[in-house]
Amino acid sequence: MPRPPKMRKIAFMPRLTFFKPAGVPLKYLEEISLGFEELEAIRLKDLDGLEQEACAAQMGISRPTFHRIIVQARQKLAQALIEGKAIRIEGGHYRLHPGHSRTESRKKPNR
């Protein structure tokens, strides 16, 4: 029997959890499910620009586990963009860091 997955620490919960291509009714779209820990991996690596070791440490997991999560998340996003599928952010094995915002990971400067 496989070991249950370790809970991953996340510091960001998005306000919006569903995205779809414009101009296509939802009833004609397939959906891809992106877990909250996959979104956190994308945020840390691709948005915040951290190295994988630092990302893994923030999420409380090993670097190889982080690598598997980020590869899977990027594959899902690529499939949704290329094949025109909707993206639903839901589920996963995670726990929210205490004291972190539910909506925004960081403020962007006005340009």
Image (cartoon, rainbow, N blue to C red):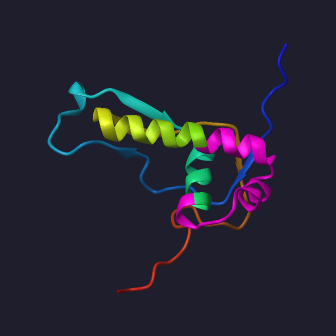
Determine which quarter of the picture holds residue 102: bottom right
Main SS of residues in magenta: helix
Q: Is residue 78 above or below residue 52?
A: above
Left or right side of 110 for 100? right
Residue 82, image x, y percentages: 31, 37
Residue at image position (66%, 60%) is 11
Q: Residue furthest top?
A: 1
Q: Position of residue 104 (x, y in %)?
A: 52, 67
- Residue at image point 14% right, 42% down: 23
| Residue closer to the observer: 13 or 77 | 77
Is 69 included in the stretch rendered in magenta?
A: yes
Outermost residue on the left side: it is 23
Residue at image location 75% in from the left, 62% down from the top: 54
Residue shown at 74% from the left, 46% from the top: 8
What percent of the width, then of the height, locates residue 30? Answer: 32, 26
Q: Does residue 18 sit above or below 30 in this rendering?
A: below
Which residue is more in the foreground, 39 or 53?
Answer: 53
From this view, report whether residue 95 is shown above or below residue 45: above
Whether residue 104 sits left or right of residue 111 in the image: it is right
Q: Is residue 108 magenta?
A: no
Q: How many marks?
A: 0
Is residue 107 or residue 100 the one in the foreground? 107
In the rendered image, the vertical position of residue 94 relative to residue 110, given as above or below: above
Q: Position of residue 64 (x, y in %)?
A: 76, 42
What segment carries the magenta color?
46-70
* Quadrant the N terminus occupies: top right
Out of 44 and 52, give the one closest to the viewer.
Answer: 52
Question: Which image quadrant is residue 111 in?
Answer: bottom left
